[in-house]
Image (cartoon, rainbow, N blue to C red):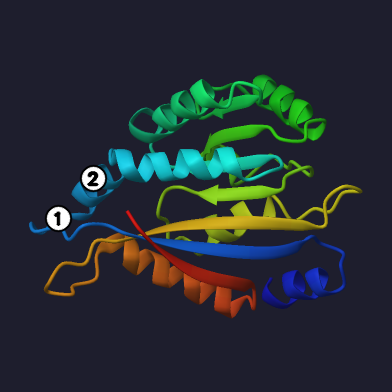
């Protein structure tokens, strides 16, 4: 897979992939959290959600924002983005949306220039191929190599109007004074290994929340 994807990008058979990693520096967390508590903290963090909403609204082109938790995260992002991006088509796709409806959304987006799809990893990392996709946003931390590569693969198809796909990988640094690496930051390092291994073009930016 590695050589094949990189070679096809180099030969311009696939779209050029640019990965922008954004590490959000949170105020230090005093108490020790389990993985589930950390995820709960991240998806309900209003500053973090606002950052994702602003990002999706301000990048141009058709954007796919991928999340993991439907009620706690996806729904909130969808409602926030819908309320401010009034002149853009915004779609919400998760397990409860049937395949006919998903296909309809795919067809609409193929003919749009700046639609936003808020979708669960499960429904969109496999099975739906939107060629006319310009941006992918990872709003939930995942270290699954298959999920990461499948999600990227959704956007690598070239079209007459698209030669580059941008991936925005959102990571979170919750390190306190003990400098202990939190779960989602550790997962981000795993994703960086995948990008390095695949020889993908990536840059890391740090943003203070």
The reply to whether the C-beta atoms of the residues labelled 2 and 1 are less than 8 Å apart is yes
Residue drawn at x 31%, y 38% is 46
Quadrant of residue 128 within the rendered picture: top right
Comes first in the chain, label 2 or label 1: 1
Residue under numbered circle 1 = 33
User: Residue 74's x, y, as percent?
Assistant: 43, 33
Q: Is residue 121 visible?
A: no
Residue drawn at x 71%, y 42% is 61
Left or right: 147 as drawn, with respect to 47: right
Disc 2 crowd rating (10 Å Cα; few below 14, some 14-19, many 20+) is few
Instruction: Label 1: state its secondary structure.
Output: loop
User: Residue 53's x, y, as percent?
Assistant: 47, 38
Left or right: 115 as drawn, with respect to 145: right
From this view, report whether residue 45 is shown above or below residue 191: above
Residue under numbered circle 2 = 41
Instruction: Label 2: state its secondary structure.
Output: helix
Quadrant of residue 15 within the rendered picture: bottom right
């Amino acid at each position: 897979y590695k050589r094949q994807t990189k070679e096809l990008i180099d030969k311009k058979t696939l779209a050029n992939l640019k990965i922008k990693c954004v590490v959000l520096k949170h105020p230090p967390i005093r108490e020790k959290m389990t993985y589930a508590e950390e995820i709960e903290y991240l998806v309900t963090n209003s500053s973090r959600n606002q950052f994702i909403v602003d990002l999706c609204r301000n990048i141009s082109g058709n954007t796919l924002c991928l999340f993991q938790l439907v009620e706690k995260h996806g729904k909130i992002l969808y409602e926030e983005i819908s309320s401010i991006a009034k002149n853009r088509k915004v779609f919400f796709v998760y397990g409860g949306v049937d395949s006919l409806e998903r296909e309809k959304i795919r067809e609409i987006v193929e003919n749009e220039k700046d639609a936003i799809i808020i979708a669960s990893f499960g429904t969109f990392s496999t099975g739906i191929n939107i060629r006319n996709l310009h941006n992918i946003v990872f709003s939930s931390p995942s270290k699954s190599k298959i999920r990461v590569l499948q999600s990227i693969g959704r956007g690598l198809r070239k079209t007459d109007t698209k030669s580059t796909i941008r991936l925005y990988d959102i990571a979170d640094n919750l390190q306190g004074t003990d400098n202990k690496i939190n779960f989602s930051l550790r997962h981000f390092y795993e994703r960086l290994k995948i990008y390095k291994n695949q020889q993908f073009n990536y840059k890391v930016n740090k943003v203070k929340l």
